[in-house]
Amino acid sequence: MLSVSMLLLTALPVPLGLPVTVDYKLPPGYQAEGIRSGEGYAVLEQSGGVVTLVPLLLDSVPLPALMAFMEEDTLLLTAPVLLVQPLIPDSLLTPASAPAPALMNIPPGFPRDYLRQRAFWLTWGAPPGTPWLWYLGGAAVLSGLVAFILIRRRRSRAATDPEAPKDMVSSDGRVLRLLESEHFVHGDWKALFAEMDTMLRALVAVRFGEGNPALTLYQIERLLSGRPEGRRFLEKARPLMREIVLQIYANRGCTREKSAGFIEVLAELHRGPR
């Protein structure tokens, strides 16, 4: 007697390339024949009505019926259709269809004829020469930028003391005019030596490039002592610098004879080498 048993589940979604277990629901007491690998699947093992296989196609894979025997009774057990999911294992990427074979339109003739037609680089010509014009232009722009920075820096140094005109450092006339100033006549020694401090700083800024108004006279002295020409300058200027500090910050007091001597020292510094 031959009977057919249908599984309730008619479609089973399974992943591609991973082992899947299919149970044919073999009744007790029946013996099942073996199932072989077919198109679209490969059988790994079988234990009675339980078959382990691997789907190999991205498609619906129908499985063969399983023949079961017991004495004079025969059963034909069917399995669900495997719906192989189009997903790569452990990934959400969907594999693309296999590409078609590439066309190989090889021209007739010898290999050199084929190479001549495929050598696209021959149309490029010789490599470009060295762009000397661009290099020269870049060097000119860089030189102009450096010259602009240097000129601007010199102007900024000269502008650190806006009240020091050029005739103050080019001659001793303005220094000697301090002998006729109201500060000298009325004995305002603090104001007089403050003007002498301004003239001395202007001279140092032009002659040595140290025109930072934030520097003290002691700091200026340390800077100039590191240069040979600065040390020669300090031989005459050091007593005047000490007296300026005492008159401005200690209000020491002075006389006309002594202050006139320091004015002459300042004038002599202006007459020195530039």
Image: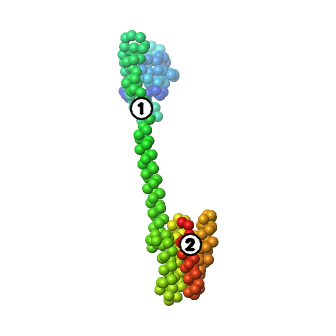
Disc 1 marks a residue whose amino acid type is: Pro
Task: Quadrant for residue 15, please give it.
Answer: top left
Q: Nearer the viewer, residue 236 or 20?
A: 236
At x 52%, y 88%, the residue is 187
Return the residue at label 2: 269
- Coloring scheme of the render? rainbow
> Quadrant where the C terminus lies?
bottom right
Residue 82 makes an appearance in the image: no
Rounded to the nearest angstrom, the CA distance separating label 2 from label 1 is 64 Å
**Residue 67 or 157: which is nearer the viewer?**
157
Q: Measured from the top left, where is residue 246 in percent x and y?
A: 59, 81
Work out whether mark 2 precedes mark 1 in sequence or the reverse, and give the earlier one. 1
Point out which mark residue 27 bears: none
Name the kind of residue labelled 2 in the image.
Leu
Residue 214 vertical position relative to residue 82 in the rendered view, above or below? below
Location of the N terminus (image quadrant)? top left
Dot 1, how many residues are within 10 Å of its Cα: few (below 14), some (14-19), or many (20+)?
few
- Expressed as whole percent of the image width and height from the top left, the position of residue 101 reads 38, 19
Find numbered disc 2 in the image and state the secondary structure of the residue it sits on: helix
Query: Can you give x and y, in whole percent of width and height, for residue 202 in the image?
Result: 50, 71
Residue 230, picture quadrant = bottom right
> Which residue sits furthest top?
109
Left-right relation of 34 to 86: right
| Residue under label 1 | 128
Image spot of residue 71 (x, y percent): 47, 14
Q: Residue at x 47, y 20 (%)?
A: 42
